[in-house]
Image (tube, rainbow, N blue to C red):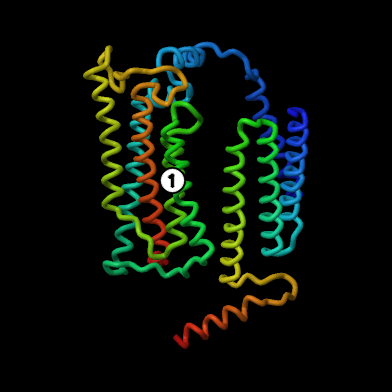
């Protein structure tokens, strides 16, 4: 049982390392802010979570603590990337290629609604 | 060409760093004063974390100086920046920045208690685990920073911050002076309580108390600094 947990832990740690590497690689290779943000935050969320889960499996007495850290990352990391993306949008960061901006219409609707009120 | 220069500079830097650190053997038994600290902090003081034992006990007077430096920095910043703020805005400055999104607000509300608990945990367990008053105080300040950036209307009451800070500093000095009166050798910051046994929460005598005071002080100071800065930035008085 312990060796199974150990090798499962190795698997999750290497998975996390791969995803963190891909995230760092994506920040270098991607062309504009939004794609970089996507590469840097999505893969680092999964990478950090699986890395910490792997550590928890290797050391079963830490498992509960690692679970708490995983929950914290699952809450905080997507929200921080959301805030970054929203800040970039509000300061008129343009994507590199032509994209369909569905959010623009929502913002316009909100503005007209606010004016009516 | 530029890259080559950078790489060669990095190589020189790395070589000099390697030269410096290669003399220090990893995991070797330390001699001189380091071994004294390593041997005496678990036995005499019953403190599991040697760094805390050094910071609060062996050189506790210096830590008092550090806390004072931090206090001076916070005060100086408040003095310099507050004048500029009161020049333009009236009594009730309203921040101009757009409201943070509802997701960020909900997350701030959710994470704030957890961050507070973590900060308190770090400075209460300063004598057992890595971390201590300064780190725990910084964590608490980040909790307030989260509320400051997610709620535009959130304000830190500087009156209470100053009170907490002053009381914490006062209790640090009081503990030190009590050591002078009650301690066996009558020296500043000396332990006068029961030291307890190693790895217990109630161990280390006054070290735990001093670190709790430092935690409150640092947390209050950094919160005050952050509030001053965010109000300056957001009321937009500095052009």
Residue B55 left/right relative to B172:
right
Q: Is residue B209 above or below residue B44?
A: below
Name which residue lies at 61% across and 42% down. A67
Disc count in the image?
1
Name which residue lies at 36% across and 28% down. B62
Residue found at the far left of this picture: B181
Residue B156: quarter of image: bottom left
Residue found at the far bottom of this picture: A116
Between A27 and A41, the one nearer to me in the picture: A41
Q: Is residue B65 above or below residue A26?
A: above
Residue A80 in the image: state x and y as whole percent. 58, 57
What element does badge 1 sit on?
helix
Residue A89: quarter of image: bottom right
Q: Is residue B78 above or below residue A85?
A: above
Name which residue lies at 59% across and 43% down. A69
Residue A32 left/right relative to B168:
right
Between A61 and B222, the one nearer to me in the picture: A61
Residue A56 in the image: state x and y as whole percent. 66, 36
Residue A35 in the image: state x and y as whole percent. 71, 62
Between A37 and B82, the one nearer to me in the picture: A37
Q: Is residue B210 above or below residue B70?
A: above
Between B9 and B199, the one nearer to me in the picture: B199
Residue B136 left/right relative to A70:
left
Instruction: Say which quadrant the C terminus of chain B sits in.
Output: bottom left
Name which residue lies at 38% across and 51% down. B225
Residue B168: quarter of image: top left
Chain letter behind tag 1: B
Residue topped by disc 1: B116
How busy is the neighbourhood of tag 1: few (under 14 within 10 Å), some, or many (20 plus)? some
Residue B202 in the image: state x and y as whole percent. 39, 24
Residue A89 left/right relative to B75:
right
């Amino acid at each position: 049982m312990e060796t199974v947990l150990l090798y499962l832990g190795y698997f999750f740690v290497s998975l996390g390392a791969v995803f963190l590497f891909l995230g760092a690689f994506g920040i270098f290779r991607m062309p504009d802010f939004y794609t970089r943000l996507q590469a840097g935050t999505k893969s680092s969320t999964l990478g950090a979570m699986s890395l910490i889960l792997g550590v928890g499996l290797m050391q079963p007495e830490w498992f509960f603590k690692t679970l708490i850290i995983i929950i914290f990352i699952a809450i905080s990391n997507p929200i921080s990337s959301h805030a970054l993306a929203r800040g970039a949008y509000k300061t008129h960061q343009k994507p590199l290629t032509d994209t369909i901006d569905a959010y623009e219409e929502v913002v316009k609707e909100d503005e007209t609604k606010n004016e009516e009120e | 060409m530029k890259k080559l220069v950078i790489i060669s500079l990095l190589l020189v830097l790395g070589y000099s760093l390697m030269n410096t650190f290669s003399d220090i053997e990893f995991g070797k038994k330390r001699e001189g004063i380091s071994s004294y600290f390593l041997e005496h902090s678990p036995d005499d003081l019953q403190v599991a974390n040697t760094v805390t034992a050094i910071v609060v006990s062996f050189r506790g007077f210096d830590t008092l100086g550090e806390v004072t430096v931090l206090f001076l920095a916070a005060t100086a910043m408040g003095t310099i920046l507050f004048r500029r703020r009161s020049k333009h805005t009236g009594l009730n400055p309203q921040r101009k920045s757009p409201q943070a999104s509802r997701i960020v607000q909900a997350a701030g509300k959710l994470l704030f208690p957890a961050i507070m608990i973590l900060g308190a945990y770090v400075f209460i367990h300063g004598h057992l685990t890595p971390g201590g008053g300064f780190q725990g105080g910084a964590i608490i300040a980040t909790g307030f920073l989260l509320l400051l950036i997610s709620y535009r209307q959130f304000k830190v009451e500087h009156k209470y911050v100053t009170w907490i800070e002053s009381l914490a500093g006062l209790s640090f000095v009081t503990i030190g002076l009590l050591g002078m009166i009650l301690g066996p050798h009558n020296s500043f910051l000396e332990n006068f309580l029961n030291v307890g046994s190693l790895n217990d929460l109630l161990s280390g005598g006054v070290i735990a108390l001093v670190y709790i005071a430092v935690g409150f002080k640092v947390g209050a100071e950094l919160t005050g600094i952050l509030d001053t800065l965010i109000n300056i930035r957001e009321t937009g008085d500095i052009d």
